[in-house]
Amino acid sequence: MIKEVQARFREETNPWFSLSWIGNRARTKPSGFAGDYEMLVKLYEEATPARGLGAYIDLCISELPLANAVRGRKDLVREYLENEIGSREGDLRILDIACGPCREFLDWPEYAGRNIEVIAMDNDPVALEYIEATVASQLPPSTTLKPVRYNAMRARNSEATKKNFGTFDIIYSVGLADYLTDEHLVGIFAGLGESLNEGGCLVIAFKDTEQYDETPYQWHLDWFFYQRTVDDVLNVYQQAGFNTDKMVLTRDRTGIIVNYVSRSAPDCIRRIDLAEMPRSARAKNTRIAKNGQIVEN
């Protein structure tokens, strides 16, 4: 019933929201989803090609809490990458899952005497063209960024990831997890954890549903994402075999975005179940031993 009322609401407000570049794009989804790379670029730049009333609507949307969080999320992962690279020595390999426009690499610093290789993975060929023309071409010599068309769902298979791309010191994703079910995330997180080098880190950003109101996005913009608390996200990691007691959580400047950071170490990432299987099937194929470990029947 709510979905029907939302659709009617958007129909009635379309004469105005069709004038808004952000509103119209979110509702029509020319790339198949609302938060495509071009949408992110507009939110990053706080710019609009619209005029008149449409421009005012765009400015209002750009000032909403989640729009500010989108910008804070980019800055937070940029800060993390710089700190992590600065704390390590030698060459590094980085994997960006569902990379979007990769704007965190604009004005990127030089790391003299080192080789920083970034694999930017996305399923949108237009986004990859944007990265090649706008981001990769301006990087300093020490950093290479390779846009690759690849479906993030395939990251569940760590053997395929390692065969196609190798292993990585840093794997991160800042714009994907809120759009996937728990079951999908369990498989992807397990696969990514197995694609890390020893001492490598996995960094995934989530929105904290307790810190914002989703109403404007799901009613006015037809922009859907899953609502999760911090405990909900930690539960997903536990199902994927991560020791959440060893994880580090940091928030962006808005407090809405949380980066969940886990390192590849014996007591941080471990497979405890068959993560590729549906939850119901896993329940049938596992039991709890006397020592508290989960084992196969």
Image (cartoon, rainbow, N blue to C red):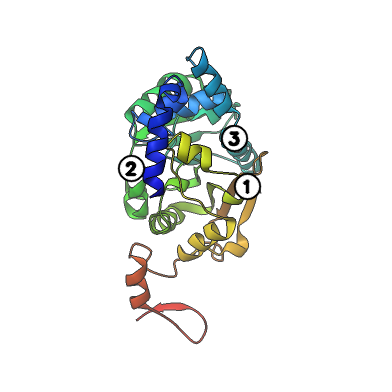
Residue on which the image places disc 1: 211
Reply above or below: 3 against 191: above
**220 and 278: which one is in front?**
220
- What residue occupies the far right of the structure in this picture? 253
Q: Given this view, does label 3 or label 1 mark the residue nearer the observer?
A: 1
**74 and 254: which one is in front?**
254
Residue 84 percent location from the top left of the image? 62, 42
Q: Secondary structure at mark 3?
A: helix
Q: Secondary structure at mark 2?
A: loop
Q: Residue at x 51, y 16 (%)?
A: 53
Q: Is residue 266 visible?
A: yes
Residue 184 percent location from the top left of the image? 38, 55
What amino acid is found at the position of numbered circle 3 in the picture? Arg
Residue 141 percent location from the top left of the image? 52, 23
Q: Disc number at residue 169?
A: none
Question: From mark 2 to mark 1, how far is it between C-alphas?
Answer: 30 Å
Q: 10 Å neighbourhood of mark 1: few (<14), some, or many (≥20)?
A: some
Residue 191 percent location from the top left of the image? 40, 55
What amino acid is found at the position of numbered circle 2 in the picture? Asn
Q: Residue at x 31, y 50 (%)?
A: 160
Question: From mark 3 to mark 1, how far is it between C-alphas?
Answer: 22 Å
**21 and 180: which one is in front?**
21
- What residue occupies the far top of the structure in this picture? 51
What amino acid is found at the position of numbered circle 1 in the picture? Gln
* Mark sitting earlier along the chain (3/1): 3
Instruction: Please state the total of marks drawn on the protein image.
Output: 3
